[in-house]
Amino acid sequence: MGLEQHKGHFGLFSSFFPSCGVSKWDLRNKIWDYMEANNLADFPRPVHHRIPNFKGASLASMGISDLREFQSARTIKANPDSPQKGIRFLTLEARKTLLVPTPRLRTGLFNRIVPPPGATKEMLRKCATSQGVRDYSVPVGLDAKVQVDLIVVGSVAVSEKGWRIGKGEGFADMEYAMMVSMEAVGQRTAVITAVHDCQVVDIPEELLDDHDLTVDYILTPTRIIKTECQREKPWGIIWNKISQETLKRIPVLKILRGREKLEGKDVRLKDEQPGLSTAEKTQRVTSENFPEGSRSQAEAILAQPRREGEASPEEGGSLSAPATLYVGNISSGTRVSDFKEALKAQQVTPARLTWRGAQRQAFLSYGDKSKAEEALTALRGLSLQGRSLRVEWARNQQGKMAPRPR
């Protein structure tokens, strides 16, 4: 089969998966099986449990040079997998700074690739390989104040809407959440993936969790897809999804946790949450807890923004920050992005925002009570989409439940 014959082939997958029964692992395994059966991958084989090194990867990589985001970028973070080798080479050839995550985040977050002085094109190609990444890189510390302009991630499956599924370990999502915590990226930082045409499939939106990273561009051997994705990317690390064991395995997490604690953020871990039984507190997040075919280990430990409907301060949720404001009477049509713009216009910047749009509520948490008092003054009398917001102290300051909008 030629590349065009595989384009969109996975639209046929709807016949394999009932709408209510498909899982991420179903999609991963079906794609891996299809690529193996049709000989669509190069070494390493088999592709199962990998970011597939698809045939035509070099051709797909060339598309990045046409993107304005690549042309203007100064620093690019790219995953170390084989199919993105071409993108790493093009980044080095364009004399841009190339950052590659350290393997499994064991010794830090980034390594910067440093080619030898006067490196030839052939040497740059070598630097872009996995061996070159090991031989020609230097670690980048958390205090380096890195500003990443473009992110390249690998994928097992991706949709034209921008939904992405990785290989199930979740490191791309975790790396992104860490970069948010370091203020190295923002919501406007473009995310690109390169895949075979057969990996572009319909992904049910209900499979996505809030921690899942979406993509803005998809490069394939035959086309460049701009996803126009409107779904917000993760806003940082949620520590109550991370276990003590995970913290020990990834030292950089411990450093980031210490920093966020000083900022007054809630950094209690999964096994430190109030209300858990002794068994739940001592349970460790290991691969045995999440057998293949169910949730992956990383899907349980990844950093993610608080999901709409989770416990809030006035319903038993707890924040380590000493001051939390309740905001009610929010219009049902208001999006979180609208709300954030309204806060920005009033120069209100909470340490943490808990959004509960379905209940027309939000909570603004601060490590410094004086900052919360300033925000309370700034927001009183504020209207958003024709409704006057109700702003007052949340329960843990008032001693009583914040009233709900009617």
Image (tube, rainbow, N blue to C red):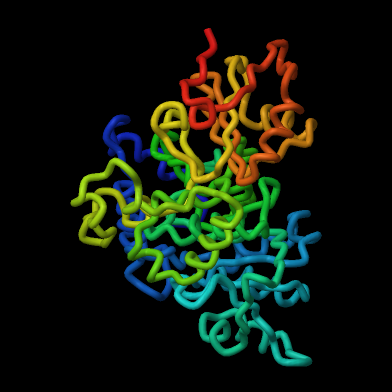
Determine the residue positioned at 77% across, 76% down: 95
Q: Residue furthest front?
A: 399
Comparing 184 with 48, the one in front is 184
Determine the residue positioned at 37% across, 64% down: 246
Can you see residue 288? yes
Q: Residue 298's x, y, as percent?
A: 37, 56
| Residue 9, placed above or below residue 382 | below
Comparing 8 with 238, the one in front is 238
Determine the residue positioned at 64% across, 50% down: 224
Determine the residue positioned at 61% across, 53% down: 263
Q: Residue 75's x, y, as percent?
A: 72, 67
Q: Quadrant of residue 371?
A: top right
Comparing 167 with 347, the one in front is 347
Q: Residue 369's x, y, as percent?
A: 64, 40
**Left/right of residue 263 with respect to residue 347 in the rendered view:** left
**Left/right of residue 313 with respect to residue 69 in the rendered view:** left
Quarter holding the N terminus is bottom left
Q: Residue 245's x, y, as percent?
A: 33, 65
| Residue 321, placed above or below residue 101 | above
